[in-house]
Image (spheres, rainbow, N blue to C red):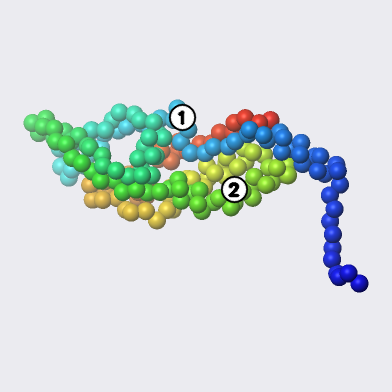
Amino acid sequence: MSGYTISVKTGPSKVSSLLKKMKALNGASVSAGFLQGSVHPGRAYRFSQDNNSVLEGTESKSSASVASFLEFGGNWLAMLRVRQGNRIIFKTIRVPPRHFMRDTANNNRQSWIESFKAVVLGTKKLSSIGVEMKRDIKKQMLSGNYEPNGGFWNQFKQGTSPLVDTGALYNSVSYRVDGGKSK
């Protein structure tokens, strides 16, 4: 007796079908995050108890540049205009790194790989991975364990999450499918 085994053989039609699906995906990619052309609106913030000061920051920026700044942290030079006497003060604000994009990738990599396998097998569309990645990024923005905002930010910020204020950046998370012949 040669042992007790179960064998599964794949016929030529199954291999041929799988190769066709893989060929259709050649060159295809899915990206999620803050895509080119997404704009984060600036706004003026009231931060003092007596509302005599306004943080100037009303110019729009790309969502990608704002997300990158939050991901890696750094110093932000804020221009404050004091209403009494129209005096201008510059203040450097330290923003700690909050690795939400890297954390998202690290926490969800295996799930995305499994989803891609399903795409290759034809049980999922490539766009469904984009939807999944977008959802995972947004979830991480809300639930990540990041250094809380400092006192300066807490005086005028609308949200409680260090990565969400008005929701503009959160709402600009998107995905894109490129290339290949996949649907």
- Give the residue furthest to the right: 1
Question: The N terminus appears in which quarter of the rendering?
Answer: bottom right
- Give the camera-side residue of 145 and 15: 15
Position of residue 50 in the picture relative to residue 8 (left or right): left
Residue type indicated by callout 2: Trp
Which mark is on residue 112? 2
Distance between the alpha carbons at the discs numbered 2 and 1: 23 Å
The answer to whether residue 183 shows anywhere in this view is no
The answer to whether residue 76 shows anywhere in this view is yes
Image mark count: 2
Which mark is on residue 36? 1
Position of residue 52 in the picture relative to residue 64 (left or right): left
Tell me if mark 2 has few (under 14), some (14-19) or many (20+) residues whose alpha carbon lies within 10 angstroms of its own.
some
Q: Position of residue 97 (x, y in %)?
A: 34, 48
Image quadrant in which you'd find residue 164: top left
Residue type indicated by callout 1: Gln
- Give the camera-side residue of 20 and 177: 20
Question: Which residue does the image show at 71% across and 33% down from the upper left?
Answer: 24
Q: Position of residue 63 (x, y in %)?
A: 40, 34
Secondary structure under tag 1 reads: loop
Which mark is first along the chain, 1 or 2? Answer: 1
Question: The C terminus appears in which quarter of the rendering?
Answer: top right
Image quadrant in which you'd find residue 168: top left
Question: Which residue does the image show at 23% across and 47% down from the upper left?
Answer: 152
Position of residue 117 in the picture relative to residue 149 (left or right): right
